[in-house]
Amino acid sequence: MHVRRTVAVVSVVLCVGCGSGTVPAPAASSFPTFGKVANLGAPLNSEDFDGGPSISPDGLQLYFITDRDVTNGGEIWVASRSSTSEAFSKLQKLGPAVNSSANEGAPSISADGRELLFDRSPDGHIFIATRSSASEPFAKAALLDLGNRACCDGFPNISAEGLNLYFCSTRPGGFGGDDIWVAARATRSSSFDPPVNLGSSVNTAANDCEPSISSDGLTLFLASDRKGGSGGFDIWVAMRASRSVPFGRPVNLGHSVNSGFSDERPDISAEGGTLFFMSNRLGGHGSFDLWETSESSGHG
């Protein structure tokens, strides 16, 4: 659904942000603050569309979508590097088990590297490709059953423990435009329960989409064209005190990250110190590029 591409048994807490009541934002000092943004450069970025980042927990692989060298629209690639102090240099297009004659987008790699979730258009649904280990190729992707046979679900983001799937959808029951929803499962081998809308604390009548959940489950990054932004889509962040309570109202990440252009598809690193995103701002290589920014002052 990336049509806006200009995107051990553990008990599951069901109230991961549900409810229609608005929850106040936490104190501003608790929100992460990010510094100057940097373009990830060539060969990761090209003259074509490059976006939809999903970083592996070790920071050495970046899954993304690109329009380069294709005739069917976006495809999912992976960029690699030897250490986090180096630039991404080795690029590889994922094979036909993932990429098809349709348009793939918005990849989300699981913490163990064994599941890759993504959306596909014009299907308007989320797909999942699995493999036995992070070093093996993915098996053929399958449609993920989230109880919505009509269009459109997209922009999946799987939590660190693999039990909560955040995504956005225009399905009935939302607050207008795209809304962010979450579906939980009891174990990695279980099916997902019916999705729950994150409620009016997070969602508005505008488009609220492209979620990225932190590894501790307490911070949610999203892209929105709601009022109060810098122009186009901006990146916002919502927080909560524990996984058993809803998220508070999102706060705009400000001009250090957002521009007058579209800044979208945030993806926070496992340690929470680096935020990857895509933007069509000036200073890129063309169309949308991949960018990053580092946290400058922690959470408090």
Image: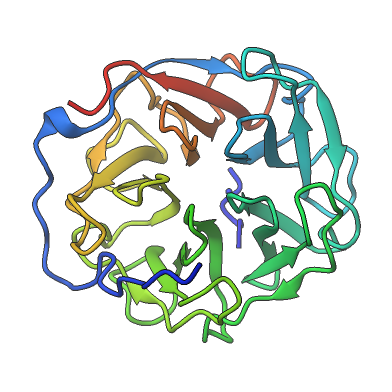
The answer to which image quadrant residue 102 occupies is bottom right
Frontmost residue, 285 versus 125: 125
**Residue at 67% across / 60% down in the picture?**
115
The N terminus lies in quadrant:
bottom right
Q: Considering only vertical position in the picture, is 58 above or below 189?
A: above
Determine whether, in the image, residue 213 is placed left or right of residue 54. left
Residue 176 picture location, percent across and down: 32, 68
**Residue at 53% across / 84% down in the picture?**
148
Q: Considering only vertical position in the picture, is 150 above or below 272?
A: below
Residue 6 picture location, percent across and down: 58, 43
Residue extending farthest to the front is 8
Q: How is the image coloured?
A: rainbow
Determine whether, in the image, residue 214 is placed left or right of residue 299. right
Task: Please tell me how many numbered marks the rendered image carries.
Answer: 0
**Residue at 56% across / 25% down in the picture?**
291
Frontmost residue, 76 versus 80: 80
The answer to which image quadrant residue 33 occupies is top left
The answer to which image quadrant residue 298 occupies is top left
Residue 275 picture location, percent across and down: 46, 30
**Residue at 66% across / 31% down in the picture?**
287
Frontmost residue, 205 versus 156: 156
Determine whether, in the image, residue 86 is placed left or right of residue 92. left
Residue 236 picture location, percent across and down: 32, 40
Q: Considering only vertical position in the picture, is 219 above or below 116?
A: above
The C terminus lies in quadrant:
top left
